[in-house]
Amino acid sequence: MEQRTYNQYCATARTLDLVGERWTLLLIRELLTGPKRFGDLQAGLRGLGTGLLAARLKHLEREGLARKITLPPPARTPAYALTRAGEELGPAVLALARWGLRWAMGERRETETFHPGWALLGLRACFDAEAAAGLRAVYEFRVGEEVFHVRIDDGAIDTLHGPAQRPDATVTMSEEAFLGLTGHALTLAEAIESRAASASGDEEALRRLKGLFRLPSPHPRTPGGPSS
């Protein structure tokens, strides 16, 4: 597949030459939360065909943004991971996520798919480091069939797929309740009160959880218009 180029000697244009093709930045998004097998990437990028996924991965490998690895035991299966150059795209992807939460989200369209695992980067994008000062805690989130966890270490955050070994607090909810939280339809306290969600674990960790993530309100991009 011939790579298109803007033919501009400009850092922005050169970067878009590398990651501006459709699906490429979403592949980066998936790999920013850890190595993924080919099937994992297919599951997280519904609508991306097998052939195009393979082509995009080859492009990322060729350009030094991703590499093939073998997952450690017990999996021992081939997977893809970001290189150092790929990982350094993280702040740019998070900046796009923050912008999107404010200016592009709005209500979910009927044709749009949703995967709770995408919340990992959303949590990083909304993280308030000042509110996490002095806090060291591990939170496990169970959203529908998806499980992921967050490690807070005195203003720093790490988000990972899968269950935590020793979570300080656990939050469980349906996908519908989670979408209600992200869409500002209800707060976590309201979700727990209505039994759309449940929370257990260390009381101090649960108390601090409410202030750790600040989701920006959607704004219209045109005066008096919808946000998306």
Image (tube, rainbow, N blue to C red):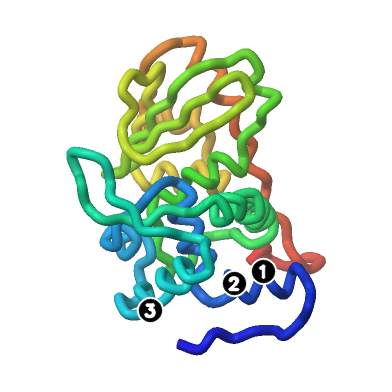
Alpha carbon of mark 3 to alpha carbon of mark 1: how far?
20 Å
Alpha carbon of mark 2 to alpha carbon of mark 1: how far?
5 Å
- Horizontally, is 86 left or right of 148 in the view? right
x 50%, y 53%: residue: 83
Alpha carbon of mark 3 to alpha carbon of mark 2: how far?
16 Å
Q: Amino acid at mark 3?
A: Leu
Mark 1 lies on residue: 15
Of the residues under marks 3 and 1, which one precedes in the sequence? Answer: 1
C-beta proximity under 8 Å, tags 2 and 1? yes
Of the residues under marks 3 and 2, which one precedes in the sequence? Answer: 2
Element type at mark 1: helix
Q: Amino acid at mark 1?
A: Thr
Circle on res. 18: 2
Quadrant containing the C terminus is: bottom right
x 39%, y 77%: residue: 55
Q: Quadrant of residue 15?
A: bottom right
- Horizontally, is 164 left or right of 22 in the view? left
Q: Nearer the viewer, mark 3 or mark 1?
A: 1
Q: Quadrant of residue 131?
A: top right
x 66%, y 18%: residue: 133
C-beta proximity under 8 Å, tags 3 and 1? no
